[in-house]
Image: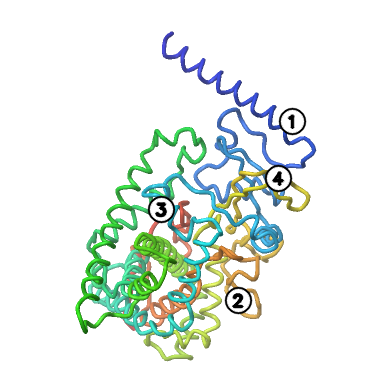
């Protein structure tokens, strides 16, 4: 049999097998009302309908098939929710039924999903880890105690931008924000900088985190065709294994160094997050060394890219809309004084700045589909059955741009939040950038402190010109889909001292 004949025979067999499986499923599903959706093709299902901007493609499909929609992505049944009412049903009313995660194959590297609070099922171990995060890392008292660290890191960011201003050099806003977020977390956890705060030269750890985000954001055939798991045809899990391994090795060295210091009598330790976690490990059986290393990995991967991406989008929208920039700078000058850095205690007195952040998160949620979920049993939502084993996506990007909720839904209008009680903390389902319910992002309390301070300080300390003399209206605002929703073209702007 020649190669062409073999391929044709193979495709025919797959098509026949899918037809038989579909027939069996129809019989099994008889009497259940499944969500509507586009007709799937043999073998590949609806994969071709995703394109390179799945959040937009699925939003368009939802206009045809409704706010609860079923697709076949390869071998995986996927149910997409695209309205605030549906999001509330899934994330609040039936939160527990929809609380399990759909595990991407990339996260199976180093068995990260077995230790990570992000991916563990809602059970005893997850509750213990979540309690540790809420009580010892993101609690109000802990964040208040670390406020001086965040202020110092923002000052270093301003110092780096001032250096660029003196040289007349454009700043890559996303990379500068990434470096600031990285050092903030590394100081909070380990009391050290993991990137040079005043230099944009490549650092191993910074590049590792970037590489992890790139690999995690790539479409992976194994996620659609689990039978390919052992083959790993795109090599994504192999590369993630290398990246995770290097990060975990680095964390291991930092932990060993701290343990050695703690063994020295009368040695002064930092009382940072690492000390807190080591104390918890010593006091009982809630966590072990593996959990500590994996929690640090979660914090760095989830906390750097999302923060830097949000700040970059906020700066881009402000520079793209000069009238917003004028209003923001006027509020800052009147409230805290021109040229001063913003402190966390100032945020409550800067409602327009806060509205800019909310409007940015409405239009550009860091994770457009939140984190995919999976149902372990059949669930009924709005009269439809979500079948057991289905992957569940909540299209936060589409909900934030729903024209039935938002006037001029695609326009950047911070004023819409000035007299509105709608917030981003997971209670109002019209805008849910951090998710909601028991799986809401644990880092939300830090993000809503850090992003306004960084943005306000950059706006109040400098005037800004787009690189190359680009007019504000001509700024490229296209998106690049990945695990986070980034600007397709990085924002580069020249700071001018005021």
Of helix, strand and loop, which one carries label 1?
helix
Identity of the residue furthest to the front in this view: 284
Q: Is residue 313 visible?
A: yes
Residue that label 3 marks: 112
- Whole-angstrom CA distance, mark 4 to mark 2, is 31 Å
Q: Earlier in the sequence, mark 3 or mark 2?
A: 3
Q: CA distance from mark 1 to mark 3?
A: 38 Å
Query: Which residue carries the number 4 mark?
Result: 64
Question: How many residues crowd mark 1 within 10 Å: few (<14), some (14–19), many (20+)?
Answer: few
**First-in-chain label (4 vs 2):** 4
> Which label lies toward us, 4 or 1?
1
Count neighbours of disc 3 (C-alpha within 10 A) and say few if under 14, some if 14 to 19, many if 20 or more.
Answer: many
Distance of label 4 from label 3 (alpha carbons):
38 Å
Q: Quadrant of residue 82?
A: bottom right
Residue 84 screen position, x and y as percent = 68, 61
Which of the two discs, 2 and 1, labels the residue nearer the N terminus?
1
User: Mark 2, mark 1: which one is toward the viewer?
Assistant: 1
Q: Residue at x 39, y 54 (%)?
A: 213
Q: Earlier in the sequence, mark 4 or mark 3?
A: 4
Q: Which mark is residue 27?
A: 1
Could you give the CA–CA distance between mark 4 and mark 1, rounded to whole angstroms? 26 Å
User: Given contact means CB atoms under 8 Å apart, are the residues at marks 4 and 2 in contact?
Assistant: no
Residue topped by disc 2? 415
Residue 427 drawn at (x, y percent): 64, 71
Front position in the image: 313 or 10: 10
Q: Alpha-carbon distance for marks 3 and 2? A: 42 Å
With 410 as the anchor, is 380 left or right in this view? right
Q: CA distance from mark 2 to mark 1?
A: 53 Å
On residue 476, the disc is none
Viewer-side label of 3, 2: 3
């Amino acid at each position: 049999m020649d190669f062409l004949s073999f391929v044709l025979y193979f495709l025919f067999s797959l098509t026949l097998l899918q037809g038989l499986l579909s027939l069996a499923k129809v019989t099994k599903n008889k009497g259940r009302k499944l969500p509507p959706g586009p007709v799937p093709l043999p073998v590949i299902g609806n994969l071709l309908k995703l394109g390179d901007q799945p959040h937009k493609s699925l939003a368009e499909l939802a206009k045809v098939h409704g706010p609860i929609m079923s697709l076949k992505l390869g071998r995986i049944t996927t149910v997409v929710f695209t309205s605030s009412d549906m999001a509330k049903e899934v994330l609040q009313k039936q939160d527990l039924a929809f609380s399990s995660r759909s595990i991407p194959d990339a996260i199976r590297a180093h068995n990260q999903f077995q230790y990570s609070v992000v991916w563990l099922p809602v059970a005893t171990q997850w509750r213990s880890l979540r309690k540790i995060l809420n009580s010892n890392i993101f609690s109000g008292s802990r964040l208040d105690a670390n406020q001086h660290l965040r202020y110092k890191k923002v000052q270093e960011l301003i110092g780096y931008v001032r250096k660029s201003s003196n040289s007349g050099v454009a700043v890559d806003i996303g990379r500068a924000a990434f470096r600031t977020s990285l050092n903030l977390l590394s100081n909070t956890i380990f009391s050290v900088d993991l990137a040079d705060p005043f230099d944009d030269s490549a650092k191993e750890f910074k590049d590792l985190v970037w590489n992890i985000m790139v690999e995690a954001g790539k479409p992976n055939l194994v996620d659609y065709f689990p039978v390919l798991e052992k083959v790993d045809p795109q090599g994504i899990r192999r590369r993630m294994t290398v990246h995770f391994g290097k990060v975990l090795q680095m964390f291991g060295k930092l932990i060993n160094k701290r343990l050695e210091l703690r063994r020295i009598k009368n040695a002064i330790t930092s009382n940072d997050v690492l000390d807190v976690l080591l104390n918890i490990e010593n006091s009982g059986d809630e966590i072990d060394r593996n959990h500590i290393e994996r929690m640090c990995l979660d914090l760095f991967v989830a906390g750097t890219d999302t923060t830097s991406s949000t700040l970059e989008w906020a700066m881009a929208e402000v520079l793209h809309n000069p009238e917003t920039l004028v209003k923001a700078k006027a509020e800052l000058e009147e409230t805290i004084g021109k040229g001063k850095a913003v402190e966390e205690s100032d945020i409550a007195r800067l409602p327009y700045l806060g509205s800019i952040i909310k409007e940015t998160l409405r239009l550009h949620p860091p994770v457009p589909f939140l984190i995919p979920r999976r149902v372990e049993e059949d669930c009924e939502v709005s009269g439809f059955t979500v079948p057991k084993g289905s992957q569940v996506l909540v299209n936060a990007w589409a909900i934030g741009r729903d024209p039935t909720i938002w006037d001029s839904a695609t326009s950047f209008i911070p004023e819409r939040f000035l007299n509105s009680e709608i917030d981003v903390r997971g209670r109002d389902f019209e805008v849910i950038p951090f998710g909601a319910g028991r799986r809401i992002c644990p880092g939300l309390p830090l993000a809503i402190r850090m992003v306004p301070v960084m943005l306000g300080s950059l706006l109040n300390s400098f005037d800004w010109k787009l690189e190359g003399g680009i007019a504000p209206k001509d700024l490229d605002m296209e998106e690049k889909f990945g695990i986070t929703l980034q600007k397709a073209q990085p924002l580069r702007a020249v700071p001018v001292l005021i």
